[in-house]
Image (spheres, rainbow, N blue to C red):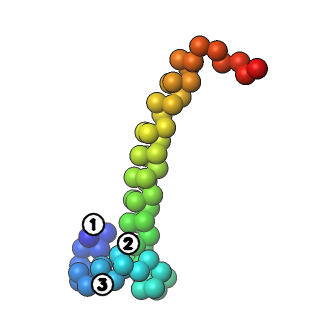
Amino acid sequence: MLHLPDTPTETIEALYNSITGVLPEWGTAERTAVNESYSDVLRFISIAALALSAPMFVYVLLLPDLKLR
């Protein structure tokens, strides 16, 4: 709804339920909005993955013996 403010709810539901079946044509404002929404989702997933993996780097520095035998 953020990137498609004037679009009917039925269209948004159709886009949400079928990621490739109901996509708008290339170059339209709706297609650009769908692409921006997808980028937002990927950004949130990437930030969450980075935040969850960051403590592991700190834990590695706290290991007593860093040499593999």
Q: Are circles 1 and 2 on residues that touch, CB within 8 Å?
A: no
Residue 29 lies left or right of residue 55; in this view the side is left
Where residue 6 appears, as percent x and y from the top left, is 23, 78
| Residue under the point 44% across and 77% down | 19
| Residue under the point 38% across and 72% down | 33
The 10 Å Cα crowd at callout 2, few under 14, some 14 to 19, many 20 or more, is some
Residue linked to disc 1: 2
Q: Is residue 53 above or below residue 25?
A: above
N-terminal of the pair, mark 1 or mark 2, is 1
Residue 27 in sight here: no
Residue 14: name its quadrant: bottom left
Marks 2 and 3, Cα distance to the nearest angstrom? Answer: 13 Å
Marks 3 and 1, Cα distance to the nearest angstrom? Answer: 14 Å
| Residue under the point 36% across and 78% down | 17
Viewer-side label of 2, 3: 3
Viewer-side label of 3, 1: 3
N-terminal of the pair, mark 3 or mark 1, is 1
Say what amino acid the circle numbered 3 marks: Thr
N-terminal of the pair, mark 2 or mark 3, is 3
Query: Which label belongs to residue 33?
Result: 2
Where residue 34 appears, as percent x and y from the top left, is 40, 73
Residue linked to disc 3: 11
Say what amino acid the circle numbered 2 marks: Ala
The 10 Å Cα crowd at callout 1, few under 14, some 14 to 19, many 20 or more, is few
Q: Quadrant of the C terminus?
A: top right
Residue 10 lies left or right of residue 45; in this view the side is left
| Residue under the point 29% across and 80% down | 13
Q: Single out the residue that lies furthest toward the front.
A: 69
Q: Is residue 58 above or below residue 44?
A: above
Q: Quadrant of the N terminus?
A: bottom left
